[in-house]
Image (cartoon, coloured by chain):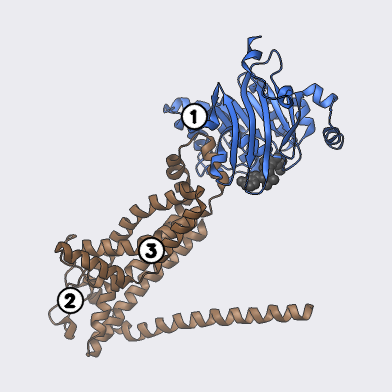
Chain colours: A blue, B brown
Amino acid sequence: MSIKTTIPVISKEAAHFQVVPGEVPVLNIRNLNVRSKNAQILKNINLVVPKNKITVLLGPSGCGKTTLLKCMNRLTDLYSELKLDGSIEIDGEDILSGKYDITQIRQKMGLVMQRPFPLPMSIYDNIAYGLKIKGIRKKSIISEKVEKHLREVALWDEVKDRLKTSAQRLSIGQQQRLCLARGLAVEPEIILADEPTSALDPISSRVIEEEFLKLKADYTIILVTHILRQAKRLADFVVFMYYGEIVEYGPASEIFENPKTDILKEYLRVGH
Amino acid sequence: MTLRRKLEEKFFRVLTALVALLVVFVLAHILYTIISKGASSLSWEILSQEPKGGFYMGGGGGIVNAIAGSFYLAIGASILAFIVSLPVALFINIYLIRYRRLLIGVRFFLDVLWGIPSIVYGAFAFTIMIFFGLRNSLGAGIVTVGALIAPIMIRAMDEVLKTIPIGLQEASYSLGSTKTETAYKIFFKQALPGFATAVLLAFGRGIGDAASVLFTAGYTDHVPRNLSDPTATLPLSIFFQLGSPIEEVQNRAYAAAIVLTFIVLCISITARVLYRKK
Ligand SMILES: Nc1ncnc2c1ncn2[C@@H]1O[C@H](COP(=O)(O)OP(=O)(O)OP(=O)(O)O)[C@@H](O)[C@H]1O
Ligand SMILES: [Mg+2]
């Protein structure tokens, strides 16, 4: 495989984060450090994310999962107190270098945030917004996509009669699905989903899970979840983080059946 | 301990009630004074006619010159201030948000501008007008009052924009919006009800101000026809009539005060209601 040779080995510790043979890497994070004024939030992160797979980020609350996702589409720019170094390469471009058009990077890396924030407009326009920004103007195409993506997240039937009403009036669970649909509508290469089912009932959660499994065919997905069972159902690869570090990384089966560190063993035992 | 806390609670409740009562009393007293002195002079004539010859000596006519003038001036100034304030307030909250120290500086600077007495704005504008050889005019008044109320509007908008959660900003950016799109498509929409309040607050401040228009807008007995005409305003109309020794004219000043107070009260109440609805 030629792919293996295109990824240089960074360091000895990082070696086991290198791409698994047979997988195509889309995202390559090297020596990423994130510091705030009085703490180091991410410590020397090295990670290669394989294409068309679901990579699940696991780890206790506050270990830096959300921060890692925010780095990937440079939302960290909004926080002047955060200092980044290292590199995050997508399609061979280092998005941290500041050379590239940030809005395009963000459209490649669709982030669905931990807490839903509907835009201050109608349900319809929430989905149409991203499409219009991408330059899609034709009404028929927009309507079609709005319906398609609302169906994908199992929201269509609930809102089809009130598409023109304010999205901020929806329930939190509905908002969460809307925000997922909104993120999908932009058709990113990589979907960064931060606990996308945290406010959902078991049935809606399952629908979203099924959707992710389908989306895998066209997208690369990085998913944060606190639900171990969900991780087991969805993950192809698992990253286990602890206090800002990647402690273990590997194929799901290996991580779940054969954890190496005590802390991950404990996490899996308690979380069961 | 519980007794102390109970007493404490009671003390502060009584104190709050007393202060509230005092405020209401002062307002009621002002209203009572102007209404008791001015109500008898309020008539359709006074609201609808320009002053006739000898108006300020007790002759016939009304104060429509001042009512219309005040509205033209305050509306013009509010529009002008809005055009300036909107981009500034958005700029502060979108672009400067990363630069904490600069942000604090800019807000402080605006608060200082807010605190400058309006006569200073008036005098400053007047020196500029002299330099360029300009006459008193509606246009000059609009620019001066606009400058006076812009800092108020900017800070009021800024306060509204500050309440927008960072998550909404993140949501907008993560869809690939530019900063401009985030400002004008997301922030603007989210803050719109609050902006209405900001504009009304500034309008209320503008319409009631006498000192800034004294040298700039001038005074005339006619409703202005265009921006280069001088214009009367309600505060100055009150000022000139109150200066008269004739009681009838003084009472008309109170009638004008009723009109002005009524306008300002209506605007404050609308602003409040809009703010609540948000
Ligand atoms: N802008 C910031 N400034 C300072 N510290 C921050 C900032 N953002 C995050 N942190 C800190 O970084 C750490 C990681 O936060 P992060 O939100 O990434 O955790 P998380 O793994 O997503 O947790 P959770 O599972 O609870 O969502 C936390 O200790 C947090 O306080
Ligand atoms: Mg998080």
Which residue is the site of mark 1?
Answer: A104
Image position, residue B71 (x, y; %): 28, 65
Dot 2 amino acid type: Pro
Q: Is residue B21 above or below residue A205?
A: below
The residue carrying mark 2 has its beta carbon less than 8 Å from ligand 1: no
Q: Quadrant of residue B135?
A: bottom left
Q: Please state which of residues A69 and B103 is positioned toward the viewer in this rendering.
A: B103
The reply to the same-chain question for discs 1 and 3 is: no
Which residue is the site of mark 3?
Answer: B202
**Mark 2 or mark 3: which is in front?**
3
The residue positioned 80% from the left and 26% from the top of the image is A255
The residue positioned 46% from the left and 82% from the top of the image is B26
For the question of whether residue B142 can be seen, the reply is yes
Q: Is residue B51 above or below residue A129?
A: below
Q: Is residue B68 above or below residue A41?
A: below
Q: Secondary structure at mark 2?
A: loop
Quarter holding ligand 1? top right
The residue carrying mark 3 has its beta carbon less than 8 Å from ligand 1: no
Q: Quadrant of residue A140?
A: top left
The reply to the same-chain question for discs 2 and 3 is: yes
Dot 1 amino acid type: Gln
Q: Are marks 1 and 3 in contact (CB under 8 Å)?
A: no
Which residue is the site of mark 2?
Answer: B51
Label annotation for residue B169: none
Q: Quadrant of residue B56?
A: bottom left
In the rendered view of the protein, which quadrant contains the C terminus of chain A? top right
| Distance from Cα at disc 1 to Cα at disc 2 | 65 Å
